[in-house]
Image (tube, rainbow, N blue to C red):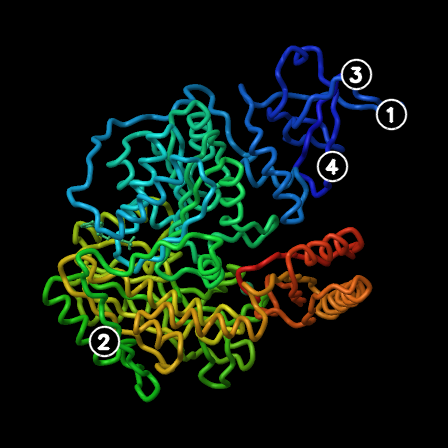
C-alpha cells in the first residue's frame, strides 16, 4: 500500500503515516505541506517521503491526507536533512524542528503571489578599498570561487569598513551563480542595510524578519525557489531560507546574543550557518569589532581564519573614551553629570549629533513608598515595577503586567512615592528641559511599536532632522551616521555585576560598540561613560580599545573556572506556581542526573539547584541546574533525562545547550 510519511509539529520524535486519497494519487507529494487529521483536530505538517509498499499493521487503520496546502513543494533535500540534524542537536522532534525552519503560518495569498518589484538604480561605491579590505576580500573570494568550506572571522574595529568586504563577497557569490544570506542582530539595522544592498544589487534582495507579513514571506519563499531573490538580509530566522545554491552566509556583529534562540529548539544561528556552509561547500563570514570569546578562540586555534582590520578608514582616530566616576557625584537634579552636560551643549552648538544610551526603558526603574519605603513589586515576578510617565502607569519588564498609577501603597496605604533611578523617559524629560529647542528621537521598545519606526529613525538621523538619538541597546550597534560626534553612556553599570560568566564580556562589547557610533566620518568623536566602577577591567580595556588584552585576561578566567570555550554548558530550568514543588522537582532531576553521571563515569560537573536570577516569573517559581562537560556527554545525559522524566502537571522544564546566559 502507498502511504505518505508525515512529520507534525508535536513533541513526539516520530513520523506519522497517512493514506493518499484518489484525487492526490497522481501528485508528487514529497516535501509538500499537507493538512492531516491528528487526534480530534487537524494539523499542518510535511510529507518527508512516500512509501510505495507500506506494510500495514492490521490493527491500525490509517487515515487519509485531508489536503495539500501549497502549489509546490516547500522543503528541499538540504532543509529536510537540516531538520533531522536540528532535532538531534537541540533535542526536539523533527516536526518541531521543521516548524522552526519553515514558518508553518506561511500564508498562501489568494492571487498574485509575485513580489512587487521596484526599479532600482544600481551604483558602485566611489572609493577604493583599503589594503586590509582588499586582503580580506581576496581570501573570501578565493574560497567562494573554489567551493571551499571555510569560516572566516573578520575582527575589524568599528568603522573599519567591514560592510564593504561583505558587499564585495556577496558580489562574488552572485557572479558565481550562488546566493547569499546576510544576517543582522537587530531589526532596527535592517533599513540601513537593505538600502545599501538595494543600491548595490538592485531588486534581487529581500528582507526577512519577524515583522514581515506571512503573505510577504510566502512570496519571498517562492521568489527564492524561482531564483528571483538571490540575497536575503534579515534576522536569525533568515538562516533557514531554502536557497539551493547557498554560497555565502554573513553574520554581522556575530557576538550578539540575539543569534541564540532561548526557547525550544534553543538553536545557535552560528552553528546552523556552519552546518549549511558545510552541506553546500560554501563560506561563512563572521564579523565583529568585539568577537565573542568563543569565536575568537576558534580563530586563534585555526578553526576559523582570522582576518584583521585594525584601523578605521583613512586611519581615522578611534573616538576617545572617558570614564566619569559617579561614585561621589549626586545626579539627582539631572541624570547627567556636569562634564557630560557640557559636552552635549558643545556638540549641539556645533550642530553635530549626539547619541545617548541608557539600557532601561520607562521613566524610572523603581518606585518607593515615601512613608514605609516599600518597593512596589510585580505581583507575579520577583522584580520591581518600572514607573512609566507617558502614559502614566507601572509596568513589569519581565512579564509585561501593567498597573494603574498612582496607587495606594500595598503595605501602609500611603499615596506618596519617591521615584528612584533613571530610565529613557526620564532622560528624555531632562533633555527637553535642558534643550527645549532640540529634537530628540527616543528609540526603545515603547517607541519602536512598528517596523516603520526603524526607517523613521534611520532617515530622521541621517537627514539631520533630529539632533539627539536617545535609546536602549537598539542605538548601540551597527548605525553609521556621519554627523554623530558624541556618545554618552548614562549608566555603564547595568550589565557589569550580573551573576553571569559573560557579564564582563557583555560590558566590554557594549561600551566598544556604542563608542563606535561616533567619529565615523570627518568629525572627531568623543565618548563619555558614567560609572560607579571606573577601575573595572572590562571598562578599562574598553576605554583603551584593547580587545586582545581583554581577551587574554578573560580566556584565563574561563580556563581557570572552566567555562566555554573550555567546556559546554547545559541549563535546565524548572518552573511551577508552587515554589516547594518547583524545588522538589529540580532536586529530583539533580539526583537522577548525578546518578547517571556517576554510573557512566562522565567527566561532567553539576551545579545547583539554585534559584534563577529572576526567581519568580509570570507567577511561576524558577529553579535551575547547570551542567558543565562536553557537548556529546551533555547531550547523552539530557536525552536520558528526557526519556525518563514525566512532568507532573503544573511543572514545566526548559533545557538549553550552551545558553546565552546563566541567569
Ligand atoms: P564597520 O562596519 O566596520 O563599522 P562600515 O562598513 O560601516 O564600518 O564603514 C564605515 C564607513 O566608511 C562607511 O560609511 C563606508 O561607506 C565607508 N568606507 C568603507 N570603506 C571605505 C574606503 N575604502 N574608503 C572610504 N570610505 C570607506
Ligand atoms: Zn511581572
The answer for how far apart the CA atoms under marks 3 and 2 are is 77 Å
**Which mark is first along the chain, 4 or 1?**
4
Q: Are marks 3 and 2 in contact (CB under 8 Å)?
A: no
**Picture coordinates of residue 497 (x, y %)?**
47, 76
**Picture coordinates of residue 600 (x, y %)?**
79, 61
Q: Which mark is residue 340?
A: 2
**Picture coordinates of residue 448 (x, y %)?**
36, 52
**Which mark is first along the chain, 2 or 3?**
3
**Picture coordinates of residue 551 (x, y %)?**
42, 69
Q: Are marks 1 and 3 in contact (CB under 8 Å)?
A: no
Q: Please name the residue shown 70% across and 11% down the image.
A: 22
Disc 4 target residue = 14
The answer for how far apart the CA atoms under marks 1 and 3 are is 11 Å
Closest to the observer: 419 or 198?
198
**Which mark is first along the chain, 1 or 2?**
1
Secondary structure of the residue carrying tag 3 is loop
- Taking 633 as reference, is 69 above or below it? above
- Outermost right residue: 59
Q: Which mark is residue 580?
A: none
Closest to the observer: 563 or 27?
563
Can residue 419 be seen here? The reply is no
- Outermost bottom residue: 328
The answer for how far apart the CA atoms under marks 4 and 3 are is 20 Å
Q: Are marks 4 and 2 in contact (CB under 8 Å)?
A: no
Q: Are marks 2 and 1 in contact (CB under 8 Å)?
A: no
In the image: residue 46, left or right of residue 520 = right
Screen quadrant of the C terminus: bottom right
Amino acid at each position: 500500500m502507498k502511504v505518505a510519511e508525515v512529520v507534525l509539529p508535536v513533541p513526539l520524535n516520530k513520523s506519522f503515516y497517512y493514506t493518499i486519497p484518489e484525487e492526490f494519487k497522481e501528485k508528487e507529494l514529497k516535501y509538500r505541506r499537507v493538512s492531516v487529521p491528528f487526534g480530534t483536530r487537524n494539523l499542518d505538517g510535511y510529507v518527508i517521503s512516500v512509501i510505495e509498499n507500506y506494510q500495514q499493521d492490521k490493527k491500525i487503520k490509517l487515515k487519509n491526507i485531508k489536503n495539500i496546502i501549497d502549489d509546490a513543494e516547500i522543503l528541499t533535500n538540504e532543509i529536510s536533512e537540516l531538520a533531522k540534524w536540528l532535532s538531534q542537536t537541540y533535542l526536539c522532534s523533527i516536526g518541531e524542528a521543521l516548524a522552526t525552519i519553515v514558518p508553518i503560518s506561511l500564508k498562501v495569498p489568494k492571487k498574485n503571489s509575485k513580489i512587487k518589484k521596484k526599479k532600482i538604480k544600481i551604483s558602485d561605491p566611489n572609493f577604493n578599498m583599503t589594503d586590509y579590505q582588499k586582503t580580506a576580500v581576496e581570501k573570501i573570494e578565493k574560497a567562494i570561487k573554489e567551493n571551499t568550506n571555510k569560516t572566516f572571522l573578520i575582527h575589524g574595529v568599528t568603522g573599519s569598513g567591514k560592510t564593504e568586504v561583505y558587499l564585495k563577497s556577496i558580489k562574488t557569490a552572485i557572479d558565481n551563480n550562488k546566493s547569499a544570506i546576510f544576517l543582522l542582530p537587530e531589526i532596527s539595522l535592517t533599513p540601513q542595510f537593505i538600502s545599501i544592498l538595494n543600491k548595490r544589487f538592485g531588486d534581487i534582495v529581500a528582507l526577512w524578519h519577524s515583522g514581515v507579513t506571512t503573505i510577504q514571506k510566502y512570496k519571498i519563499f517562492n521568489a527564492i525557489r524561482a531564483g528571483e531573490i538571490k540575497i536575503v538580509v534579515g534576522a536569525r530566522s533568515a538562516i533557514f531560507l531554502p536557497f539551493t545554491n547557498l554560497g555565502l552566509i554573513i553574520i554581522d556583529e556575530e557576538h550578539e546574543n540575539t543569534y541564540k534562540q532561548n526557547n525550544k529548539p534553543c538553536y545557535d544561528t552560528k552553528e546552523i550557518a556552519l552546518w549549511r556552509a558545510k552541506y553546500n561547500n560554501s563560506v561563512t563570514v563572521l564579523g565583529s569589532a568585539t568577537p565573542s570569546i568563543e569565536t575568537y578562540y576558534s580563530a586563534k586555534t585555526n578553526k576559523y581564519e582570522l582576518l584583521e582590520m585594525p584601523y578605521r578608514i583613512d586611519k581615522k582616530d578611534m573616538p576617545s573614551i572617558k570614564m566619569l566616576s559617579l561614585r561621589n557625584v549626586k545626579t539627582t537634579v539631572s541624570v547627567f553629570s556636569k562634564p557630560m552636560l557640557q559636552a552635549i551643549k558643545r556638540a549641539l552648538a556645533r550642530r553635530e549629533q549626539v547619541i545617548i544610551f541608557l539600557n532601561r526603558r520607562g521613566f524610572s526603574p523603581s518606585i518607593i513608598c515615601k512613608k514605609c519605603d516599600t518597593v512596589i513589586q510585580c505581583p507575579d515576578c520577583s522584580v520591581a515595577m518600572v514607573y512609566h510617565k507617558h502614559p502614566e502607569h507601572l509596568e513589569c519588564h519581565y512579564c509585561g503586567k501593567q498597573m494603574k498609577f498612582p496607587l495606594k501603597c500595598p503595605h501602609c496605604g500611603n499615596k506618596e512615592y519617591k521615584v528612584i533611578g533613571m530610565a529613557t523617559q526620564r532622560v528624555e524629560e531632562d533633555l527637553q528641559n535642558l534643550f527645549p529647542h532640540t529634537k530628540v528621537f527616543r528609540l526603545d521598545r515603547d517607541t519602536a511599536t512598528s517596523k516603520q519606526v526603524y526607517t523613521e529613525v534611520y532617515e530622521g538621523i541621517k537627514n539631520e532632522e533630529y539632533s539627539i538619538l536617545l535609546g536602549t541597546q537598539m542605538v548601540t550597534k551597527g548605525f553609521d551616521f556621519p554627523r554623530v560626534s558624541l556618545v554618552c553612556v548614562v549608566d555603564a553599570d547595568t550589565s557589569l555585576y550580573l551573576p553571569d560568566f559573560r557579564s564582563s564580556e557583555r560590558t566590554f562589547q557594549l561600551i566598544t560598540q556604542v563608542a563606535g557610533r561616533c567619529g565615523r566620518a570627518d568629525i572627531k568623536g568623543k565618548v563619555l561613560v558614567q560609572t560607579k566602577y571606573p577601575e573595572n577591567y572590562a571598562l578599562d580595556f574598553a576605554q583603551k580599545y584593547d580587545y586582545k588584552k581583554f581577551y587574554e585576561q578573560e580566556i584565563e578566567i574561563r580556563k581557570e573556572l572552566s567555562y566555554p570555550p573550555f567546556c559546554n554548558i547545559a541549563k535546565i530550568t524548572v518552573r511551577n506556581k508552587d515554589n516547594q514543588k518547583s524545588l522538589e522537582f529540580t532536586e529530583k532531576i539533580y539526583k537522577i542526573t548525578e546518578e547517571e553521571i556517576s554510573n557512566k563515569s562522565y567527566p561532567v560537573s553539576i551545579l545547583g539547584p539554585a534559584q534563577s536570577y529572576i526567581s519568580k516569573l509570570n507567577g511561576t517559581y524558577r529553579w535551575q541546574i547547570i551542567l558543565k562537560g562536553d557537548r556529546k556527554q551533555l547531550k547523552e545525559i539530557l536525552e536520558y533525562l528526557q526519556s525518563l522524566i514525566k512532568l507532573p502537571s503544573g511543572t514545566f522544564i526548559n533545557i538549553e545547550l550552551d545558553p546565552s546566559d546563566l541567569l
